[in-house]
Image: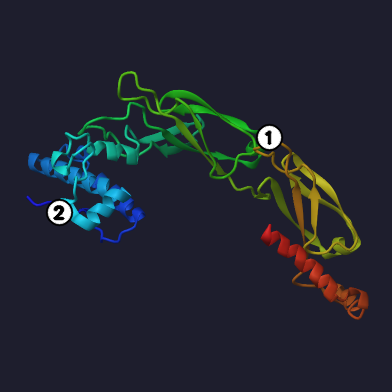
């Protein structure tokens, strides 16, 4: 039977990009993997196996720039063929060192996937998926990776835990495990614990790794900006005008700060060393207090009369210089 066009096998047009080729292969490889057809009829099993081989053959050529260039020029009749090994062509598939599962395993990591649940023993926990996510895939063709698949989990941390570092202890599928989290980690950061992944399916094979993904729990009062923390302090306008004291949250509890007379909305007060530790091992960030001046929406008659007496005071009128100064501070917050 005549071979189908490789682009047609992947459901693509001839000018497809490398990324489109990868994406199409990934989707179809999952669909036609023989392990997904174990409960099917013999005819359907055979069809899946043939489709899987055909798909791997097409991807092997189109994902290689040199092979693809020759295929685009000569088609299936390219001089020398496309097989792995000297003088080989695709007619000798499997005998020239080509194994469809090699491509699949290189693409998906091989081995075992599946759900991982980390139980803290207090009703909480977190879940993840083993690499590949294809359950028990592993039968069918040729060689396999001897290393077990990686486990992936997500650990949720408060700012206080991030500031001090923490060890999360619990059980993963019945196994007692401790996960040391260094201080200063960031949202989306990943690190691995060697040998704590899935066991290898093959005798003498090494277990995979445990890949830990960090997720920050948003704080109710503090915002993170790299190693700095930001707190938006809403001041009564009389405190901003006359000066006084204000209370702000820190990672170590509440702290009182002094508000200078004439503090403007948009001013930033910096508390040195009250931020998060650097993951590089040096120094800490700061706590930046962003001052916002509150103007009441409604006034009593007495309050209104008092303020009316100040309406004509030139000292209370904003100047262009002040406008530019406040604007530059607000602009800094949006561009840092």
Instruction: Give the residue drawn at x 66%, y 48%.
Output: 226
Residue highlighted by disc 2: 4
Vertical arrangement, residue 128 with respect to residue 14, above or below: above
Taking the image as shown, residue 161 lies to the left or right of residue 128, namely right
Q: Looking at the picture, how far across and down is residue 186, in whole percent?
A: 59, 43
Which is more toward the observer, 117 or 196?
Answer: 196
171 over 234 or under it: above or below: above
Residue 324 in percent (x, y) is at: 80, 71
Q: Is residue 152 found left or right of 26 in the rendered image? A: right
Is residue 63 among what the camera can see? no
Q: Disc 1 versus disc 2: distance between alpha carbons?
A: 58 Å
Q: Residue at x 80, y 60 (%)?
A: 267
Q: Is residue 155 left or right of residue 21?
A: right
- If you read the primary sequence from the N terminus, does the residue marked by circle 1 or circle 2 appear first? 2
Residue 206 shown left or right of residue 277 in the figure: left
x, y percent for residue 181: 58, 32
Q: Residue furthest bottom?
A: 312
Quarter occupied by residue 50? top left
Which residue is tagged 1?
281
Front position in the image: 162 or 32:
32
């Amino acid at each position: 039977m005549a071979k189908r066009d490789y682009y047609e096998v992947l459901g693509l047009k001839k000018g497809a990009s490398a990324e489109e080729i990868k994406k199409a292969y990934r989707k179809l490889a999952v669909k036609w993997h023989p392990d997904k057809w174990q409960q099917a009829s013999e005819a359907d099993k055979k069809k899946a196996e043939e489709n899987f081989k055909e798909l791997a053959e097409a991807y092997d050529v189109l994902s290689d720039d040199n092979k693809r260039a020759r295929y685009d020029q000569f088609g299936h009749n390219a001089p020398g063929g496309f097989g792995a090994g000297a003088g080989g062509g695709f007619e000798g598939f499997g005998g020239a060192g080509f194994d469809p599962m090699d491509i699949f395993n290189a693409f998906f990591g091989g081995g075992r996937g599946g759900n991982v649940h980390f139980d803290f023993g207090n009703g909480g926990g977190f879940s993840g998926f083993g690499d590949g996510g294809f359950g028990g895939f592993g039968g069918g063709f040729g060689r396999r990776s001897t290393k077990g698949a990686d486990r992936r989990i997500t650990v949720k941390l408060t700012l206080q835990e991030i500031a001090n570092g923490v060890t999360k202890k619990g059980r993963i599928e019945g196994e007692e495990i401790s996960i040391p989290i260094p201080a200063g980690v960031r949202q989306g950061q990943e690190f691995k614990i060697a040998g704590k992944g899935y066991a290898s399916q093959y005798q003498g094979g090494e277990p995979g790794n445990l890949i830990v993904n960090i997720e920050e729990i948003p704080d109710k009062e503090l915002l993170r900006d790299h190693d700095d923390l930001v707190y938006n302090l809403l001041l009564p306008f009389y405190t901003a005008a006359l000066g006084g004291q204000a209370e702000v949250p820190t990672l170590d509890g509440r702290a009182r700060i002094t508000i200078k007379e004439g503090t403007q909305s948009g001013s930033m007060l910096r508390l040195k060393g009250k931020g998060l530790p650097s993951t590089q091992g040096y120094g800490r960030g700061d706590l930046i207090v962003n001052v916002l001046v509150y103007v009441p929406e409604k006034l009593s008659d007495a309050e209104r009369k008092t303020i009316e007496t100040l309406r004509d005071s030139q000292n209370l009128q904003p100047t262009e210089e002040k406008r530019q100064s406040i604007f530059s501070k607000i602009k800094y917050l949006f561009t840092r």
